[in-house]
Image: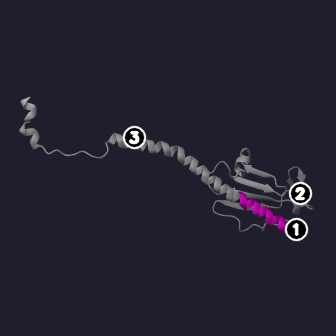
Amino acid sequence: MRYLSNPSPLTNSLPHKATSGFTLIELMIVVAIIGALASVAYPSYLESVFKGKRATATASILECVALLERRFTLTSTYTDDACNNLSNDDYTISIDVSMATRNGRACTANSRENCFEVTATSQIVADDSCKALTMNELGVKAAVPTANVTKCWRTT
């Protein structure tokens, strides 16, 4: 009992430093939790970004089709220079008015000016699910790869 009430001079002479902060284990647990959250959130974030860029591409295609139809009402032909200003850093818009066949019907020399296909080609390397979106004069939508037509054209 005497020992407890009167501590030795050796223990009293050492300075007592208050400990504060985090241990290495606590820090590693926080890093692991952040890593797990990031591994789930980052792919969802990328898909959301790609979806927004695809929405811009589909809007550009629809605008180009409207411009082509407007040109057709004035000149009775489709031309491949109607949508020169619609490309951006994410998608390149191109028009093909020189196809020989379209969906089983012929676009012959006499009717070739009545056929077109507008294509938005992705410049985004990481977006493998929708490399290209297309629409023709009949309003038929397509995508590359073809299995993703509904996904690629959905903007909501």
Q: Which residues are magenta?
A: 58-71
Q: CA distance from mark 1 to mark 3?
A: 66 Å
Local SS, label 2:
loop
The image quadrant that residue 138 belongs to is bottom right
Q: Nearer the viewer, residue 66 or 118?
A: 66
Q: Quick one: SS at disc 1?
A: helix
What kind of residue is marked 1? Thr
Counting other residues with Cα less than 10 Å from the Cα at mark 3, is it few (<14), some (14-19), or many (20 or more)?
few
- Give residue 32's position: percent from left, percent from top: 43, 41
State whether residue 145 appears in this view: no
- Magenta residue check for 61: yes
- Residue 109: name its quadrant: bottom right
State the residue position of label 3.
29
| Rendered location of residue 7, percent (x, y) | 9, 36
- From the viewer's perspective, is the residue at label 3 or at label 2 nearer? 3
**Is 90 covered by the magenta stretch?**
no
Disc 3 and disc 2 in contact, CB within 8 angstroms: no
The residues tagged by marks 3 and 2 sit, at their Cα atoms, a distance apart of 65 Å
Q: Mark 1 sits on what residue?
A: 73
Which of marks 2 and 3 precedes in the sequence?
3
Amino acid type assigned to the residue bearing label 2 in the image = Cys
Q: Do callouts 2 and 1 mark residues in contact (Cβ within 8 Å)?
A: no
User: Badge 2 is on which residue?
Assistant: 107
Q: Residue furthest top?
A: 1
In which quarter of the view is residue 72 placed?
Answer: bottom right
Q: Position of residue 110 (x, y in %)?
A: 93, 62
Colour scheme in use: one colour
Residue at the spot x=48%, y=42% of the render? 36
Residue 4 vs residue 150: left or right?
Answer: left
The amino acid pointed to by label 3 is Ile
Q: Can you see residue 2?
A: yes
